[in-house]
């Protein structure tokens, strides 16, 4: 039995400019006519980014595609966009044959589309928090993970490599100069947005190590570390790869703060 | 869970005291001791001219760079050399930032590095 299309438009929660246009039923030629009416609702608002939720669409006609292409163009003219979410594989395959993938972006669900919007348009940072035992053998998988996250968020290969290097050097230092007990932990807090990444990496130290560390750090900041000096190389590398680098000491905690701007 | 690194050795035709070492993987703090031991064994066995092919070496950190500098120094002290070829741009940037490009013998390709052997 034919299911007439039902279209609802609502503001996407916790966003400034996004709306969710939900479709339920068959987007045949008759249903396509309702699309432009729904777009009017968006044009008359301040919002210009539309997530077209197709998870309940059972038929998608070329007439509907035409309306959505027109609607998208109008949103683009307003500085926005239209993306699809939740489309069935069958319909998506059909649309790809029409060349839709050259025009539209597709997301698995509304949440993915919203995350992409918040990242690209509102430039919202995303946060990663890791806590792991202070063992050298755990540093490589941590740095690989951070590097993959950067790549996933659109950072280039070179930048992801630099980020990986920063994490590696800071965490290696944390292991080497931190408290050497089985319960010692490294906490890594990363904020990433389209402009750059910011790390706060914290570990526990005992008072003797702290005193040694402060002496080493002071000597290194007072003079240019020679390339042949082991300790200096890692710090020099972090400084050169980042825009901000500082170490804060408290009684039993060392916090390394690094900020790196995106370069590619 | 140390980083994976593999060293593959090849003899060099006509050069009895030389060895080609292909580095495969990541060179970092978790495996430097292993690599150090292996290369020092080569020195001890009389192979004082070493050519390192970095074509499949994805990553080096400051600790790894430290042992590369050590190999270069040790080889020179023995009257030989430690040459590096096929460094990828990411690894080269790290070497450059640390200021080691003038201390290591780096060649664009393997043929150049081998030809430069005495």
Image: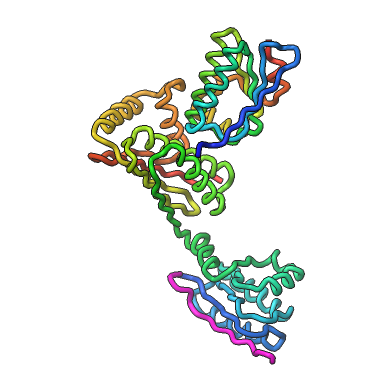
- State whether residue B90 appears in this view: no
Q: In which quarter of the image is the C terminus of chain B?
A: top right
What residue is rendered at 45% in x and 41% in y?
A138
Nearer to us in this view, A82 or A128: A128
Q: Which quadrant of the figure has residue B11? A: top right
Q: Which quadrant of the figure has residue B107? A: top right
Q: Whole-percent x and y of residue A170? A: 41, 38
* Residue that sits furthest to the bottom in the current view: A1
What residue is rendered at 56% in x and 78% in y?
A21
Q: Is residue A178 above or below residue B73?
A: below
Nearer to us in this view, A91 or B26: B26
Answer left or right for A56 relative to A258. right
* Main SS, magenta residues: loop
Nearer to us in this view, A27 or B64: B64
* Residue that sits furthest to the top in the current view: B79
Where are the magenta residues, as a range?
A1-15
What residue is rendered at 50% in x and 44% in y?
A141
Q: Whole-percent x and y of residue A77? A: 60, 69
Q: Whole-percent x and y of residue A232? A: 41, 27
Answer left or right for A51 relative to B116. left
Q: In this view, does B92 lie above or below A15?
A: above
Q: Is residue B9 above or below residue A99?
A: above
Q: Whole-percent x and y of residue B22? A: 65, 27
Q: In this view, does A167 lie above or below A31?
A: above
Answer left or right for B67 relative to A105. left
- State whether residue A88 appears in this view: yes
* Residue that sits furthest to the front in the current view: A182
Magenta segment: does it hold A23?
no
């Amino acid at each position: 039995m034919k299911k007439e299309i039902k279209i609802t438009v609502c503001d996407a929660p916790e966003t400034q400019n996004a709306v969710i246009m939900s479709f339920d039923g068959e987007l045949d030629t008759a249903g396509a006519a309702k699309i432009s009416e729904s777009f009017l609702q968006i044009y008359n608002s301040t919002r210009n980014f539309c997530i077209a939720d197709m998870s309940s669409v059972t038929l998608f006609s070329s007439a509907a595609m035409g309306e959505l292409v027109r609607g998208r163009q109008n949103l683009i003219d307003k500085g926005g966009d239209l993306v699809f979410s939740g489309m069935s594989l069958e319909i998506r395959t059909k649309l790809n044959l029409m060349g839709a993938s050259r025009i539209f972006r597709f997301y698995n669900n509304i949440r993915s589309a919203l995350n992409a919007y918040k990242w690209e348009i509102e430039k919202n940072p995303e946060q990663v928090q890791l806590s792991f035992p202070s063992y050298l053998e755990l540093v490589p998988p941590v740095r690989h993970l951070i590097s993959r996250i950067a790549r996933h968020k659109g950072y280039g290969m070179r930048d992801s490599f630099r980020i990986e290097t920063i994490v590696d050097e800071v965490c290696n230092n944390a292991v080497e100069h931190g408290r050497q007990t089985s319960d010692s932990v490294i906490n890594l807090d990363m904020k990433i947005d389209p402009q750059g990444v910011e790390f706060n990496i914290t570990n526990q130290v005992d008072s003797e190590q702290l005193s040694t560390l402060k002496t080493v750090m002071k000597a290194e900041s007072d003079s240019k570390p020679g390339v042949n000096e082991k300790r200096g190389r890692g710090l020099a590398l972090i400084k050169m790869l980042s825009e901000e680098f500082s170490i804060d000491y408290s009684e039993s905690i060392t916090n390394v703060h690094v900020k790196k701007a995106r370069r590619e | 869970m140390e980083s994976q690194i593999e060293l593959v050795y090849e003899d060099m035709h006509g050069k009895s005291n030389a060895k080609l070492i292909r580095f495969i993987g990541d060179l970092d703090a978790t495996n430097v001791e292993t690599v150090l031991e292996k290369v020092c064994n080569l020195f001890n066995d009389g192979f004082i001219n070493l050519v390192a092919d970095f074509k499949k070496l994805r990553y080096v950190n400051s600790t790894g760079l430290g042992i590369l500098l050590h190999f270069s120094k040790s080889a020179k002290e023995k009257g030989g050399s430690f040459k590096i070829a096929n460094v990828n741009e990411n690894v080269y940037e790290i070497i450059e930032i640390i200021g080691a490009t003038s201390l290591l013998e780096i060649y664009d390709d393997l043929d150049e590095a081998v030809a430069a052997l005495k």
